[in-house]
Structure formats: structure tokens, C-alpha cells
Amino acid sequence: MQAALPEFEEAIAELERRARDFLTGPGRVRCLKAFSLDPEAFRFLVDKTLKRSDARSLLGLFVRIVDEEHATVSRRLRERPAPTGPTVCPECEIGGGLHSIDCSQANGRAA
């Protein structure tokens, strides 16, 4: 069996605890590969699975979700827009893209 990364073990620890079982076999190998390709997408799917308290086989559900959704989630996370500038104007200290009427940043005016 492939040696797992400590970060991988940490990511699946809560799943294994709730399932009262260990992720083993081919499912573990596929999950480890998915984790190595995109840890952020993998952790997103761990969280999604943990919200499914009605699952009879939590680890089986998780492996299926990773198999079916990891590539899509990974792509969507890569395609999300980058944050744009500060959320609060440094001059008038108003957020949400709004400005006070006398702020030089209002309507694109620079001081």
C-alpha cells in the first residue's frame, strides 16, 4: 500500500472517526491520488460528505463522491475569480464598493 501523507491522514480523520472504520483498499488509493492532485477540492468533498449524516456507509459514499465530483470541483475552484481589491475604501472607510459623497475614489475620481 502507498504511504499516505500526514495531510491526507488529517483530512480523512473525521470521516474515519464518524464511520468507525478506516478508508482502505482501492478506494483509499483513489482518494490519495485525488488528494495529491488537488488537496483543496478533496477537503471540500470531505466537508460535503460529513454533512450527509444519513449515509449508511459514510466511507463508501465519500469514495463515490470523490470518484464522481473531484475533477469538477477542482476545475471550479481553479476558475473562480480572484479577489478584487480591498473590501473597504481606505479613504472613506465605507465597504461594498460604496463611497461617501466627498471621497476621491467615488466615480473613479482620483485625488
Image (cartoon, grey):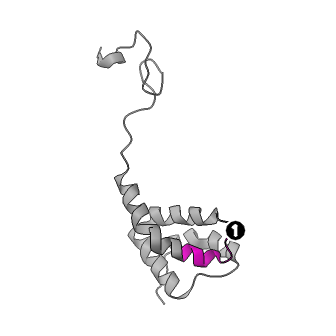
Assign a secondary structure to mark 1.
Answer: loop
In-image side of 42 versus 23 (left or right)? left
Toward the top, the furthest residue is 102
**Residue 94: horizontal and vertical position, in percent?**
48, 21
**How many marks can you see?**
1
* Foreground pick, 45 / 13: 45
* Foreground pick, 81 / 14: 81
* Foreground pick, 101 / 64: 64
Residue at the (34%, 14%) spot, across then down:
104
Residue at the (41%, 72%) spot, across then down:
36
Residue at the (52%, 65%) spot, across then down:
45
Is residue 55 inside the magenta stretch?
Answer: yes
Q: Magenta part of the protein: which range?
A: 53-63
In the displayed structure, 57 sits above or below 53; it is below
**Residue 69: horizontal and vertical position, in percent?**
46, 67
Residue at the (55%, 68%) spot, across then down:
11
In the displayed structure, 80 sits above or below 59; it is above
Quarter where residue 52 is shown: bottom right
* Label 1 crowd bin: few (<14), some (14–19), many (20+), radius 10 Å: few
Quarter where residue 109 is shown: top left
In the displayed structure, 7 sits above or below 83; it is below
In the displayed structure, 43 sits above or below 31; it is above
Amino acid on which the number 1 mark rests in the picture: Asp
* Foreground pick, 69 / 24: 69
**Residue 28: horizontal and vertical position, in percent?**
52, 82
Q: Quadrant of the C terminus?
A: top left
Q: Is residue 9 visible?
A: no
Which residue in the protein does label 1 denote? 54
Is residue 58 inside the magenta stretch?
Answer: yes
Q: Is residue 20 visible?
A: yes
